[in-house]
Amino acid sequence: MAPQQELHKLSHCAYALTYHLVLVTKYRHRCITDEILVRFEEIARARCAGWGGELLEVSGEPDHVHLLVSLPPTLTLAGFVNNLKTTSSRLIRRDFAKALAPYYWGPGFWSRSYCVVSCGGAPLEVMRQYIAAQDSPA
C-alpha cells in the first residue's frame, strides 16, 4: 500500500496539493550545467518557501528542469510559476553571464511555456467511483 500524502493545514482548510512542474530553456538551448542546476535549486527552494510551499525534488537535463513542489491553495499557480521563472532567470543570467553569453543575447532564460501536472492522491477513476458510491440525500 502506498504511503498517505501528508496534509498541511491553514486556519480554515487542510490540503495536500503537489505539482510536477517542467521548465524548458529558451530556444531549447542545452546550457544547464551542474552548477546552474544547483543554483536553480537554491532559488526554487527560496521561492517555494516564500510562497508558503515546499520544494520536494528537483532535477534536470541540459535543456530543461523538473520540480516536485507542494503549494498552498491560497496562491495562484500561474503567479507562482511566473515569479519562479522571472526570479530564477534574472539571477541565473546574472550569476552565469559568461557561460550563457553564447546562448542568449537578450533577456530571458526560460521558454514562455511550461508544463504543470497535479500529482498525488488516488487516480481519477478511483475518485469517480468513490464519489458515485456516496449515499444520496434522503
Image (cartoon, rainbow, N blue to C red):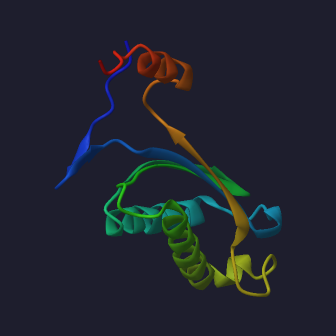
Measuring 35% from the left and 57% from the top, which residue is drawn there? 53
The picture quadrant where one finds residue 29 is: bottom right
Instruction: Indicate whether 110 appears above or below 130.
Output: below
Q: Outermost residue, front direction?
A: 138
Counting from the top left corner in percent of width and height, residue 60 is at: 62, 51
Counting from the top left corner in percent of width and height, residue 126 is at: 49, 18
Instruction: Indicate whether 70 appears above or below 102.
Output: above
Counting from the top left corner in percent of width and height, residue 134 is at: 37, 17
Q: Relative to the observer, which residue lies in front, 25 or 130?
A: 130
Task: Give left or right: position of 75 versus 91.
Answer: left
Q: Outermost residue, left direction?
A: 11
Q: Relative to the observer, which residue lies in front, 136 or 2?
A: 136
Counting from the top left corner in percent of width and height, residue 22 is at: 63, 52
Instruction: Indicate whether 23 appears above or below 98.
Output: above
Measuring 40% from the left and 45% from the top, which residue is drawn there? 17
Q: On the rendered image, what quadrant is the N terminus found in?
A: top left
Measuring 46% from the left and 18% from the top, which residue is drawn there? 132
Task: Give left or right: position of 134 versus 89.
Answer: left
